[in-house]
Amino acid sequence: MARTGHGPTLPGMGVVILVRHGQASFGSEDYDVLSETGWSQGHRLGAWFAERGLAPTAVVQGGMRRHRETAEAAGWTDSTTDPGWDEFDHLAVVAADPDLPSGDLDRREFQRAFEVATARWTSGAFDGEYAEPWPAFRARVTAALDRAREQAGPGGTVVVVTSGGPIAAACAALVDPEADDAGFARLWSRLNTVLVNASYSRVVVGSTGARLLTFNEHPHLDGAALTYR
């Protein structure tokens, strides 16, 4: 589904561009801060858009520091905040897994623990154990996407700077709106695990609703600038 470039859209259609934040500071005291690589990724993203004449009519960011810093790095300083685009509390979800390995985890070990823990979270069997159960997260993201679609309107381009979880949820809903709960959770997991830092996915908005045009584009990134966590 991924494509590069910014092909023309039909007249009267709006576009919502879902941007994943740059690399955060895994393993540091404050995860919610862009790493040096994350700042570079944001700069590259902003330059890529500018070189192609893509000027958003509005920029929306989640309420997290890594969202704000990514927008700043890209040069999108005139933005509004919508906490509906915040990431779920992944540390709390992982910590809630009774089978979580003890001790400090490196990136690969954490990724394995993350996938097991989120499968437990999305199963719906343990909703009472989470401050934000999976259904509440899905509803929050759906509402945020609806607001962004309305803001794009006919002919507008809204850039949303957010995190992998909300992007995967929004894209899964657009790819298969008829999926049952288990099918949606599987699709969300597959999309979430492959999202690149500072990648973007495009949603076109027309009279018949919204459709996913591209997913996880990252032609502006290569080498050490290409990261997943």
Image: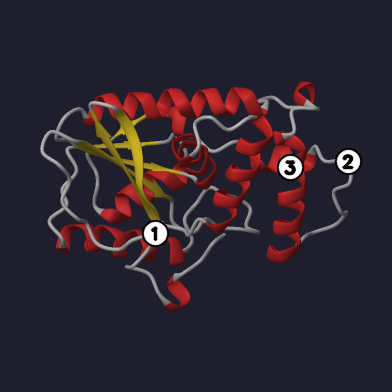
Quarter-wise, where is residue 229 in the image? bottom right
Quarter-wise, where is residue 81 in the image? top left
> What kind of residue is marked 3?
Ala
Q: Are marks 3 and 1 in contact (CB under 8 Å)?
A: no
Q: Residues within 10 Å of mark 2 (few under 14, many from 20)?
A: few
Residue 132 drawn above or below residue 57: above
> What kind of residue is marked 1?
Ala
Distance, label 2 to label 1, CA atoms, is 37 Å
Residue plotted at (24% across, 63% down): 48
Q: Position of residue 147 (x, y in %)?
A: 34, 24
The residue singled out by tag 2 in the image is 98
Residue 99 drawn above or below residue 150: below
Residue plotted at (47% across, 56% down): 34
Q: Position of residue 120 (x, y in %)?
A: 77, 38
> What kind of residue is marked 2?
Pro
Distance, label 2 to label 3, CA atoms, is 13 Å
The residue singled out by tag 1 in the image is 2
Near-viewer residue (217 or 223): 217
Residue plotted at (50% across, 51% down): 33
Mark 2 residue element? loop
Q: Which comes before the other along the chain, label 2 or label 3?
A: 2
Q: Is residue 57 visible?
A: yes
Q: Which comes before the other along the chain, label 2 or label 1?
A: 1
Q: 118 left or right of 48?
A: right
Q: Total marks drawn?
A: 3
Q: Are marks 2 and 1 in contact (CB under 8 Å)?
A: no
The residue singled out by tag 3 in the image is 119
Residue 93 drawn above or below residue 30: above
Mark 3 residue element? helix
